[in-house]
Image (cartoon, coloured by chain):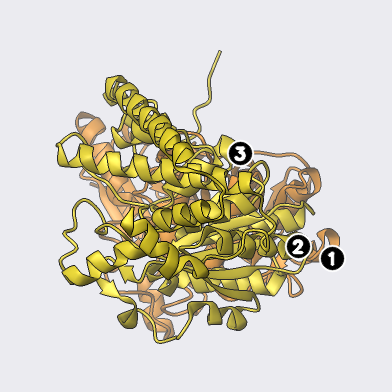
Chain colours: A orange, B yellow
Amino acid sequence: MAKISYLQAIKEALDYEMGQDENVFVLGEDVGKKGGVFKVTEGLQEKYGELRCLDTPLAESNIVGTSIGAAMMGKRPVAEIQFAEYILPATNQILNEAAKIRYRSNGDWDCPMVIRSPFGGGIHGALYHSQSIETVFTSTPGLKVVIPSTPADAKGLLISAIRDNDPVLFFEHKKAYRLLKEEVPEGDYTVPIGKADVKRQGDDITVITYGLCVNYALQAAERLSKDGYEAEVLDLRTVYPLDKESIIEAASKTGKVLLVTEDNLEGSVMSEVSAIIAENCLYDLDAPVMRLAGPDVPSMPYSPPMEDFFMVNPEKIEAKMKELAEH
Amino acid sequence: MQTVLQFMFKEDKRLMDYKEAGLEKEDLKEIYRTMLLARKLDERMWLLNRAGKLPFVISCQGQEATQVGAGYALNKDVDIISPYYRDLALVTHFGMTPEETMLSAFAKKGDISSGGKQMPSHFSKKENNIMTQGSCVATQVLHAVGASFKFKMDNEARVAVTTLGEGSSNQGDFHEGLNFVGVHNLPFICIIENNKYAISVPRQLQYGADKLSDRAVGYGMHGEHIDGNDPIAVYKAVKEARERATNGEGGTLIEAMSTRLTAHSSDDDDSYREKTEREGIREEDCIIKFRAYMTEHEVADDEWFDALEAELKKQVTDATKAAEKAPYPDAAEALTNVYEEVKHG
């Protein structure tokens, strides 16, 4: 098995699916000749042609809306939105159309499409290149929202997303693109959508998180281990619909739960995770549920001290973990 | 009869010569039949609404000529339509049956469009190449554009057609989609059914352009401005647009000047239009005009029209009775078809 980056793993998934299913095609701004602003789609146009790796006009609603039409006709479009913030002009097509195609036609039509987009901060991207926007979509049944935390999960979940017969939003942490590397199975490799994954076993406290924060939480857990506390780390992987069973199991196992997201605190995915734990695990808890998240300000500021203040990092997680363990 | 004669003299010249459009007398009868069927279904739904049996109606009345003229020029076996809520006559031509229309109106289980989930006139029927639609206007444009992109990718001799009101032509999705059509010369036809009102807002407050079809130049498409009350003119324009599309000559934007004979919907009182205007537009009723034209050109006589009237009335009555008797969906069906339902075992 080769050791590859999160970015290469995503490219490998696209390449593999385009190679084995001619209905799969990629479209978005700069994805063709340039290979994408992050180079995720580099080489795909040369290999599969201009139409199957299509440079689109700069119009996000068109990218998503035409993908919906093509998907309804049997294609499997993988649309790229250049930065997660830029998806907002397409939200009507996503929330009112893609999410409702199957339901409103009572199963007559479906919409098997993927929308990929880089999200997240810590890369000096400021307000409009740092956001976590998953909660725009995590209260709309009909959609699935996937956020991988490792290269192997990125590949396996993206292949599953492309093969899924419902619309899937696939958010990739842009800082993870080149930061994270690991061995990734070659060829056909899938990871199921809708299933959380225990990334580390521990008996003292439980950390539930997703995206790049999984890596940060694992780093923090290793440091905490030196203090004699072992943390269970649950990676949600799919943030909508949530894997309730795994959340309940992980929370009940230690009775002490820390929820981590780099999104703003109020109304984040973790608010729902917290509600699931409150409803199901109250008598198993030994401490109040704790949350660590970005502050409730409009977005991540540019200047390094303010950016660091906003971002979750291993040190902040470790401090919270210790506080919880000692509760 | 006097009204009909009056139109024959006053308006007949405005309808295109059917031979010039490549149509036969039998074609005109077929077109008229579907127009009248849609009208009768529509009128019945209003009656049922006023009788308290249907909560909501939104009409095709006055736009049947545009819809059936267009539909008749398409190949309904292969072409895809992405319609809007006024397109009862278009979807009827494409294969939506009177009973299916009534099942949808009554929100019954057998509603092919949505199984009782959507309001009426949100048409959908995959078997007949009718894409599903929501209520947010102009979103359907992009779905047709996406379908036409598929046809281009797979080198298929098919076209995707979308329709919308002129009000919807101000939405971003309209501009974004038509721009994309122009970039790739897609096999696509957009028909603006310009009935001059976006609910209450008249066209002079909707757009500053003289003709919406002039926008075609800006998108790199072919533009046509036609009389939407003349099914023959619509047929000819759409036929030519389809030929261009399947010859790789790109998309067409057709603005069909049409007429909304009713209020916006059953929840609207139409009070923003002067009484004289509301009565005046009755003179533009495409069904009356087309009948007069067919009579004058000896396509059909009163006996044929009377027989058709009786036949369609019975069809609508039978469909209404069947739909009224049909069961509602179970409450638990509200939970179905959210995601693909994989059957185990």
Crowd around label 2: few <14 · some 14–19 · many ≥20 (10 Å): some
Asked if A191 appears above or below A5 in the picture, the reply is above
Q: Which mark, by number, is residue A51?
A: 2
Report whether B60 appears left or right of A267: right
Q: Is mark 3 on a helix, strand or loop?
A: loop
Residue A57 in percent (x, y) is at 62, 75
Crowd around label 1: few <14 · some 14–19 · many ≥20 (10 Å): few
Q: What element carries label 1?
A: helix
Q: Which mark, by number, is residue A46?
A: 1
Residue B306 in percent (x, y) is at 41, 37
- Name the residue located 20 percent from the left edge and 33 percent from the top edge: A282
Q: Is mark 2 on a helix, strand or loop?
A: loop
Give the distance between the C-alpha atoms of the residues marked 1 and 3, in whole angstroms: 28 Å
Q: Which mark, by number, is residue A155?
A: none
Report whether A134 appears left or right of A114: left
Q: Which of marks 3 and 2 is in front?
A: 2
Return the disc, 2 or 1, that comes first in the chain's sequence.
1
Viewer-proximal residue among B6 and B65: B6
- Residue type at mark 3: give it: Val
Viewer-proximal residue among A285 and B16: B16
Do we see residue A31 in this rendering? yes
